[in-house]
Amino acid sequence: MEITFLIILSLIGLMIGYLIIKPIVLLLLLKLQLGDKAILMFNPISGILGVLMQSIKTNNDVMHTIYQALIKNPKAQVILSNYLATPCIILTGSEYLKDTFRDHYDFEKIDPFMVPQFAQRGLLMIEGEGWKRQRAFLGSAFTFEKLKSRLPMINKVVNCITEQDDKKNLTDFMARITGEVVIKSFFGELAEGFQLEGKDAQVALTQLTGEMQIFKLESLYYFLKSLIFREKMWEVFPSKQEKDIIKRVTNVRIKVKELILKRIEQLRENPIQNQDSMVFLDIYVTEYLKQQQQQQTQKEQLIEIEEILHQFITLFFVGTDTTATTSGTCLYYLAKYPEIQSEILQEVQDVIGDNEINESNLNKLLKINALIQEVLRLRNPVLFTVFRKVKHDKQVQDIKLKKGWVVVQMKNSSSIKDSHFDNAIEFNYKRWLKKGNLIKNDNGFIHIPFAAGQRNCIGQHMAMMEARIIIALIVRKYKILLNPAVKQVRFGIKLLQCIEPDNCLLFEKRI
Ligand code: HEM
Ligand SMILES: *[C@@H]1O[C@H](CO)[C@@H](O)[C@H](O)[C@H]1NC(C)=O
Ligand SMILES: *[C@@H]1O[C@H](CO)[C@@H](O)[C@H](O)[C@H]1NC(C)=O
Ligand SMILES: *[C@@H]1O[C@H](CO)[C@@H](O)[C@H](O)[C@H]1NC(C)=O
């Protein structure tokens, strides 16, 4: 009896030691060393993710807690927190960011999906030589020169969906547009009528990728399970909901693979001649077929169908919600500040009139461009980069990072500092229209909405292009208003920082 009791007691002791004492001692030592350069935010077990969730609950703003802490401690450059029992170091000072973005090979991304065979082999997650090859291979397809052949498609998608959608759910409305643009950019005409789960493919995919993230944050049980078992969590006493997600993932894989195989057959018969208008799938398949003929390519250079599949899921995942949220937040500011809306509308009428947006007038939409930059400065949907694990002990400035620790790059703390922007916390899109040095004391890592260094966002031209077209075409047709029925608008987080609730805007047709 007593022995059992003692065993249980010491197990509890060990657990407390492992989960609480160990990380807190490491963090305290760092805090002692860094002084007021660091803020301590230890939170037993749920760690930094728990801090963010709590901040939404109490303040309607995912970043409120961190933001207040940074304002109270203007000297702070790092936040010391935890990820289960591991120290989690959030870097916000631009010198720390500079080092970690530059030495990206010393860090390894932690899979945010943790779903087997999903996107691990796509560009966002792949590491090492595989990453180098993919980045070089896809890089040329993401230049403005190559992307401009998509302009007519993007115009059409924005117009069609704006016409069809009831526009009562901003998140849904925007993601239908950006999701369809990614699908058409990847599959081209093959995507006509592409359905999953009996819905338009982009709707089904957005729901699936969204659910995969959210269900872990909504229930403590799933949350801990994902922290402890990682990608194995789906095999440990799977609940009905987890089984359902895995089943849907399998179904998506089958459907997408069918399309890829179909395209391989088509291009085997009729190779594409015009390189400039190739969609992503065609670029891949053309290379795939070339390699099949040569048969001497080194193994790690070989493209496999599985990689094409993961790449589609990756681009859909990183290209849809990011651009949707950015565009939606821009529309919100237009509703909030009607005078800005008039200025933007005027620009659209002057530059494009009743025409389509094409390669020559797109770059003349300077005010829209400035508006997007300002939203990316203050309300960048991507608050953090993907969490990373330190691959081996590494010195970053004055911090000795240990192998296995978690590092988060928080990109926007410089955005609100008067030392970098005049009246930094004021929303003023016109700051981006001035000539000359727009950012004070810029080390190149101050305004980096698309991250920085070699592993920055490969889709940034595509995102900017899309967001400009979405804003221009919608504002030309609709007056955007705040929904008076919504008493309080907040910045929450689904996976990204986004404006909530979904019905905060009304669209009134201009005559
Ligand atoms: C406003 C919209 C967007 C924002 C704010 C954004 C932001 C970012 C950021 C911050 C990263 C770095 C992530 C990390 O290192 O953990 C990233 C990476 C990436 N983005 Fe975007 N992105 C946007 C749109 C897009 C679009 C439209 C695409 C393509 C369809 C795209 C494709 C990618 C890819 C493939 C990566 C991984 C690159 C690599 O690791 O080499 N993004 N993005
Ligand atoms: C683009 O549209 C403008 C009208 O806004 C038109 O004058 C111009 O010729 C078009 N350019 C191209 C390359 O189609
Ligand atoms: C970063 O984004 C948060 C999220 O809303 C915002 O509150 C803050 O102004 C931005 N700056 C910080 C704290 O880095
Ligand atoms: C808007 O759509 C999203 C995604 O489909 C959904 O989760 C949310 O509940 C909807 N919001 C409203 C207010 O209907």
Image (cartoon, rainbow, N blue to C red):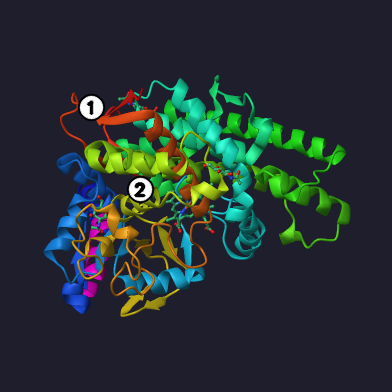
Comparing labels 2 and 1, the label whose residue is closer to the camera: 1
- Image coordinates of residue 434 in percent, x first then y, are 32, 63
Residue at the (80%, 43%) spot, across then down:
272
Q: Is mark 1 within 8 Å of ligand 4?
A: no
Instruction: Give the residue type that dot 2 points to.
Output: Pro
Q: Secondary structure at mark 2?
A: loop
- Characterize the local packing of mark 2: few (<14), some (14-19) or many (20 or more) Cα atoms within 10 angstroms: many
Disc ID at residue 381: 2
Q: Residue at x 75, y 56 (%)?
A: 302
Disc 1: CA contacts within 10 A as few (<14), some (14-19) or many (>=20): some
State which region is magenta: 15-30
Q: Which residue in the protein does label 1 denote?
A: 483
User: Which x, y percent locates residue 154?
Assistant: 54, 37
Which is nearer the eye, 336 or 463?
A: 336
Residue 83 in sight = yes
Query: Which residue is nearer to you in this view: 238 or 511?
Result: 511
Compared to residue 265, the image places residue 375 above or below, namely below
User: Looking at the picture, which amino acid does disc 1 mark?
Assistant: Asn
Picture layout, residue 70 above or below residue 142? below
Q: Where is 289 relative to 163, above or below? A: below
Image quadrant in which the N terminus is located? top left
Q: Residue at x 54, y 29 (%)?
A: 248
Position of residue 322 in the picture relative to residue 297 (left or right)? left
Position of 253 compared to 386: left or right? right
**Location of residue 37 in the rendering, given as x and y in whole percent from the top left corner:** 20, 73
Query: Does the Cβ of the disc 2 residue fall within 8 Å of ligand 1?
Result: yes
